[in-house]
Amino acid sequence: MPNSDNNENNLNNTNNNITNPNQTSQPMSDGSKPFIEIPQKYYDNLAKEQQEKKEQELLLQQQKAENAQASSESSKMLLFVILNAVLIYGLLYITIYKFHYALILIPIIVVILSIITAIKDKKESSYPASVMVGGILVAAITFIVSMVKEEEIDLWTYYAIISAGIGFIGLMISSIITKIISDYKNIKALQGLGYILFFAVLIGAPLYLSNKYHEEFYKFLFKEQVEVKAETEEEFVQKTLKQRYGKEFVCGTYASKSDEEAKILKVGTFESKIDQDRRRITERVCQDSEKRDFTVVSKAFNEGSKQYIIKDDYLAALFTDNLKSNISKEILTLTQAKEVDVSIYPEENCYFYGDCANCDEYYERFEKENDATHQYSVSTKLNFEKEIQSDELKFVNNNKFKYMISITGQFGSQSDYSAIITGIFEFLNNKGYKNNYGYIISIYNDKTNAGFETKELVYKVKGDTNTDKTFKDPEVLRVSANK
C-alpha cells in the first residue's frame, strides 16, 4: 500500500540520522531547522578564555594595589627624609648658636621614631633608610653652599661632615632597633653582642674623647674653643698656644736657630715674680717650627684649679714688629726726622696683641682691659689660626688698629707741618694700609740744651675711619704742653 511504503521510508531516514551523527544535516522538506551538536572543545576554550580574563583582571587589580602601596611608601619615605633633614640641620644650628646639648636630641628622636615605625610597619619600615638619606641630603646641600660662601667655608663644611656622620650612625641605630622589635626571635647571640657593643661605643666614645682630647673634641663638635684643662702650668701653656694658633710650639730647652751652633740653648723659664695685683707671673721663651723665638707670659688666675692667663707676643714676632719697623724707616726717610715711634692700638684686647697705646679709647677700656677675670676669658677664647696664614699687611688690614705715630726731629721754628702729614698719608695709602680704626700723628721738636734733651709737642692730628678706608681728612688738635 502506498501509505505503508512512505512510513517505512520515513522510519529508515530517521534511523539513518541517528546512526550517523557526523553526517551533515540537510534541511528538511517541511522547512524546519535540523539539530546541530556543538563540540566539547568549544566549551573548553570558552571556559579557558573566561578564566584567563579573570586572572588578568585579578593581576591588574593586584598591580594597582601594589602601585598604590608603593606610592604610599614613597610618600612616607619622602616625608621622613624631609623631616630628618630639617631636624638634623635645625638641631645642628641650635647646637652651634643657642644650646650645645641640643645635639643630644638627634639620637633621641631617631630612637623614638624608629620604635614607632618598627611597631607599626615591622620589617618593612622605611625609617632607617630615611635617616641616612636625610643626613646625606643635608650634607650635599651644605657642601654646595660651602663652595659658594667661601668666607664661611669652615662652618658649612662642618655641617656637611657632621650631618653625613649623623645620617650613617642614625641608619645603624634605627636598623638595629627595627630588627630587635620586628624580628627579635631570629637574633643570634653573637649578633646581639654586636648590638650591645655598638651602643656601648656610641655612648662611651664621646665621653672618652671629651676627657682625653677635651679641647679638640669640643672645638670640632660644637665649633667652640673651650677652657683648657691641664695638670701643670707648663701643660696649660702648651695647650693654650696650640689652641690659639693651631700648631705645636716648643717651650723650654730647644736647639739653636743657627745650625752652625752646636750648643743647646737653655731658654724657657725666667724667674717668676709677683705683679702689683699679687699674682704670680712667669715668662718663658718658646719657639715655633721655623725656629722663631717669642715670649710667653703666664699669669696665675686660679692656681688651685690650674688656670692661667696666657699672654704671648707671637703675632708681634710674625707681623707687627716688622710692620712697625718698616713704617718707621719710611717716615724717617720721608721727614728726615731723628726718631719715629709707631704703635698700633687694637679695638679691644690690647693686653694680648697690638699695643696698649696712649689714646682715649684705651683709657675708656682701661679697667676692663686690666681686669683678671676678663683677661682669663679672653685668653681662653683667642684664636688666630687663620690670621697666621696671611702676611703682615693682610693681618693689620683684616683687623681694627688705630695707627699711633710719633715723630721727633729738629724742626726749628717751622710752623707748617701739613706737608709732613700729607706725605705720611700718601705713603700709607700707596703701600696699601687701610684706615680701619683711625689714626693719631704727633710731631715733636727736639730741643737739646746744655746736654739735656727735651721734646716739645708742636703739631698733632687725628682722624677716624671712612668709607674708603684711606688716610685723609686730618683734624688738627690744639697743643698746649711740652713733652
Image (cartoon, rainbow, N blue to C red):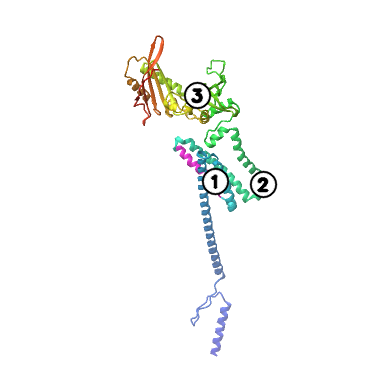
Magenta region, residue range = 126-147
Q: Amino acid at mark 3?
A: Tyr
Question: x, y (%) of residue 434?
Answer: 39, 27
**Label 1, on which residue?**
131
The foreground one among 439 and 313 is 439
Q: Which image quadrant: the C terminus?
A: top left
Front: mark 3 or 1: 3
Q: Secondary structure at mark 3?
A: helix
Q: Secondary structure at mark 1?
A: helix
Question: Which circle marks residue 188 in the picture?
Answer: 2
Question: Which circle marks residue 314 in the picture?
Answer: 3
Estimate the spatial distance between the alpha carbons at disc 3 and disc 2, rounded to whole Å. 60 Å
Q: Is residue 72 visible?
A: yes
Residue in the picture at 57% in, 83% down: 11
Is residue 141 shown in magenta?
yes
Q: Amino acid at mark 1?
A: Val
Question: Which circle marks residue 260 in the picture?
Answer: none
Question: x, y (%) of residue 466?
Answer: 37, 30
Is tag 3's residue or tag 2's residue first in the polypeptide sequence?
Answer: 2
Q: Secondary structure at mark 2?
A: loop
Is tag 3's residue or tag 1's residue first in the polypeptide sequence?
Answer: 1
Residue 436 drawn above or below residue 92: above
- Residue contact between numbered discs 1 and 2, judged by CB atoms under 8 Å: no
Question: x, y (%) of residue 358?
Answer: 43, 23
Residue in the picture at 67% in, 47% down: 188
Question: x, y (%) of residue 243?
Answer: 53, 29
